[in-house]
Image (cartoon, rainbow, N blue to C red):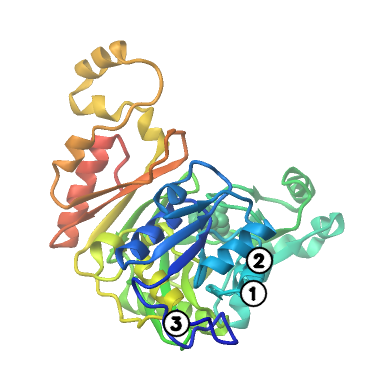
Amino acid sequence: MPLPPSTPSRPAEPWLPGSTRLGVLGGGQLGRMFVHAAQAQGYAVTVLEPDAASPAGAAADVHLKAPYADAAALAQLGASCAAVTTEFENVPAQALRALAAHCTVAPPAAAVEVCQHRAREKAAFLAAGVPCAPHAVIDSAEAARAEAHAALLPGILKTASLGYDGKGQTTVLSLAELPAAWAALGSVPCVLEQRLPLRLEISVIVARGADGTVVHLPVQQNLHRGGILAVTQVPAPDVPEATALQAVALAQQLARALGYVGVLCVEFFVLEDGRLVANEMAPRPHNSGHYSLDACDVSQFDLQLRTLAGLPLVPPRLHSPAVMLNLLGDLWFDGAAASVAGPAAASASAAKAPPGPRPPDWPAVLALPGVHLHLYGKAEARRGRKMGHLTVTAATAAQARAVALQAAALLGLPGF
Ligand code: ATP
Ligand code: MG
């Protein structure tokens, strides 16, 4: 394998399948699914992840157990891999910069840095001509008292960094509440956003190559429960065609404006009046794109691989309508398996069952047609923890939805 050219973050030639080693920063499920995609094409994969037991580390050819900012580990990763990507956005941007001195890195550190900070992210939306919620930066006691913020209320105060799954957010109804709300979030830099009237939420995944080619997955319609993604439906059942086209165009516009290379997910709100507003973006594959593993001829992880290795990007095709259900650790506690056999059996088995988590009734779920089960290899089920997902594919959207509702009922999940 030749050494990378002088601008290593833009490969002049592809890193060919079967010929080299790729790296991932982060050991979560997104990294695990990237590892699977890369190994399927004969690449060896090294994962850098401090946790000894991680979904991606368990699947990788080599697991480097060290902090993401560990200079020696980064040097080893950079020296042994032709190209390195990241599977979560809070990896220190400095680590990506350090790696870029040794090997191809995608996405670029600067773009990841933008995604790590809500204020920078919103500035990037606006600079790219992508509408976002009216907002203000609250980074001091004075700012938390400013009368000018009245126009943003009722609003949502969000920490500028490290928020996920609805954490680090609070609703603010009046100016009087704002100082205490800011203090309750730790007096850290925050963004106050106007609370918008949402009709529904969608996301778009685009992939941009180093040569500027951009492709996209179909628009995903997302349902959240308790601030965590619960259900994704594709094609998006309630999104007009014009809105879907506009969302794709805006996501592509953003990827170009950022000089992005890699997979980028943009979350949008569709407002009551039909307008589109960008919520946030993720510089990596996204939970809402998992259905692409089973319903598209090119998955979001294949796209990540191709952008990283400099391989051709062809437009992915949705070959089956799909519904994805997230499988949180709650399912291991809430006795869904017992509900299959009815209340009498449920109470009988509850009386005998040892306390603690037990897996859902997988055979019952897998007896349904078109069910694709993905578990991430996490040893311990905890409430709110993403343990896996399942995707239902079918010949029609109505069939996929009907089977997904059956699966949800078997698992004890609410309908949608
Ligand atoms: P993620 O896990 O997607 O990173 P997060 O914790 O970063 O989530 P956001 O996506 O900012 O949080 O918000 C979580 C949810 O809260 C959104 O999906 C939406 O349902 C709701 N929400 C956020 N901002 C607004 C807003 N300005 N107006 C109305 N609803 C909002
Ligand atoms: Mg979100």
Q: Secondary structure at mark 2?
A: helix
Specify whether tag 1 is near ligand 1 (CB below 8 Å).
Answer: no
**Amino acid type, callout 3:** Gly
Specify whether tag 3 is near ligand 1 (CB below 8 Å).
Answer: no
**Figure quadrant of residue 273:** bottom left
Q: Which mark is residue 93?
A: 2
Residue 90 visible in the picture: yes
Q: Where is mark 3, residue-wise?
A: 209
**Mark closest to the chain's N terminus, 3 or 2:** 2
**Amino acid type, callout 1:** Ala
Residue at (19% x, 55% y) in the render: 400
Taking 151 as reference, is 203 left or right? Answer: left
Taking 160 as reference, is 230 left or right? Answer: left
**Mark closest to the chain's N terminus, 2 or 1:** 2
Q: CA distance from mark 3 to mark 2?
A: 20 Å
- Check whether the beta carbons of the residues at disc 2 and disc 1 lie within 8 A of each other: yes
Q: Where is mark 1, residue-wise?
A: 110
Q: CA distance from mark 3 to mark 1?
A: 16 Å
Q: Nearer the viewer, residue 151 or 292?
A: 292
Residue at (55% x, 76% y) in the render: 131
Image coords of residue 278 (percent x, y): 52, 70
- Farthest-out residue, front: 1
**Amino acid type, callout 2:** Ala
**Mark closest to the chain's N terminus, 3 or 1:** 1
Q: Secondary structure at mark 1?
A: helix
Q: Secondary structure at mark 3?
A: loop
Q: CA distance from mark 2 to mark 1?
A: 7 Å
